[in-house]
Image (spheres, grey):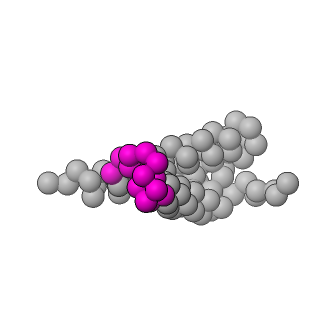
Amino acid sequence: MVKIPDNIYIGIVLGAVLLIAGYYFFLFVNHLLVQYNVLYALPPKPKIHLMSLFVTVIIFRMLMIKWQKTEAGRGVLFAMFVALMLYYFFEFRS
């Protein structure tokens, strides 16, 4: 098992990587579903951003509760907060 250091900077990087990986994962699944006509497409891109936040929330909970990495969890929480503020800024600006 890989040891994750309990560092806020590691948490920020981990949160950013998880957000990006979650977004591209859901985008890839959406592309496969549309390409092979298995199901209808997933929700549009703004909703996919929020779905990637959900994946990061699960990892955040595991860091804080299961693995007792509070500083890394705070970094992931900070990355989620910044991503959520950017989402609202770009999605709901007038």
Q: Is residue 72 left or right of residue 91?
A: right
For the point 35% across and 55% down, which residue is it?
A: 45
**Residue 63 located left or right of residue 44:** right
Q: Residue at x 68, y 44 (%)?
A: 63
Is residue 20 positioned above or below 41 on the image? below
- 67 or 46, which lies in front? 46
Residue stretch in magenta: 31-44
Question: x, y (%) of residue 36?
Answer: 46, 56
Quadrant of the rendering where the C terminus is positioned: bottom left
Residue 56 visible at all: yes
Residue 81 seen from this side: no
Residue 44 location (% of width, % of height) = 33, 51
In the displayed image of the protein, which residue is found farthest to the left?
A: 94
Residue 35 is one of the magenta-drawn residues: yes
Q: Position of residue 73 (x, y in %)?
A: 63, 48
Looking at the rendered structure, the number of numbered marks drawn on it comes to 0
Q: Residue at x 57, y 57 (%)?
A: 18
Q: Quadrant of the N terminus?
A: bottom right
